[in-house]
Image: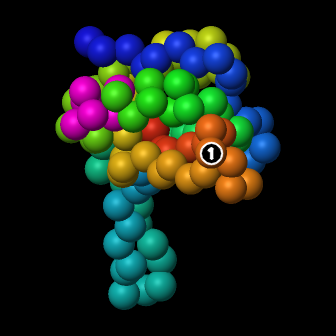
């Protein structure tokens, strides 16, 4: 399985977090006003918003090459969560967003979302 590239810096902790990728709850409103609930599935996966600020061009190109190699969200890859050092199998949920950092020609702000498979 492919592995997320090793970069020269860790993601920004500003806004760092994780959440459940999907709510497994099926909800049905009953005629008497009660709500009936049950799980549609038992596996509870996670999502992580990843933000890199002022990333050097070489690191941005590593992410871009990795994104191309896994065809954006088509193929899973291993990623080490910097918060707990656990390796997860993940996919990109959408194309990676690349923006020049403060109009610099060699620093990039890179944002993407990872979802556990």
What is the x, y in percent for residue 105?
62, 45
Q: Quadrant of residue 12?
A: top right
x then y, percent, for residue 110: 57, 43
Between 15 and 106, the one lying in front of the other is 106
Q: In x, y percent, where is residue 91? A: 35, 34
Q: Is 46 situated above or below 88?
A: below
- Residue at coordinates 43% horizontally, 46% vertically from top-left? 96
Compared to residue 96, the image places residue 79 above or below, namely above
Residue 84 inside the magenta-drawn segment: no
Between residue 89 and residue 72, name the one nearer to us: 72
Q: How is the image coloured?
A: rainbow
48 sits left or right of 104 in the view: left
Percent position of residue 112, x then y: 50, 45
Determine the main secondary structure of the stretch shown in magenta.
helix
Give the crowd class for mark 1: few <14, some 14-19, many >=20 residues within 10 Å: few
Tell me the residue at 25%/30% (across/down): 70
Depicted 68 relative to depicted 86: above or below: below
* Residue 33 shown left or right of residue 90 in the figure: right
């Amino acid at each position: 399985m492919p592995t997320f590239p090793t970069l020269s810096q860790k993601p920004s902790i500003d806004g760092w977090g994780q959440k459940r990728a999907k709510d497994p709850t099926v909800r049905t409103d009953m005629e008497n006003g009660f709500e009936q609930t049950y799980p549609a599935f038992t596996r509870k996966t996670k999502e992580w918003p990843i933000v890199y600020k002022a990333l050097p061009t070489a690191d941005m190109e590593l992410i871009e090459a990795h994104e191309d190699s896994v065809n954006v969200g088509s193929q899973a890859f291993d990623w080490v969560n910097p918060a707990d050092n656990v390796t997860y199998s993940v996919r990109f949920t959408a194309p990676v967003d690349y923006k020049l950092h403060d109009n610099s020609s060699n620093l990039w702000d890179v944002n993407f979302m990872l979802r556990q498979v």
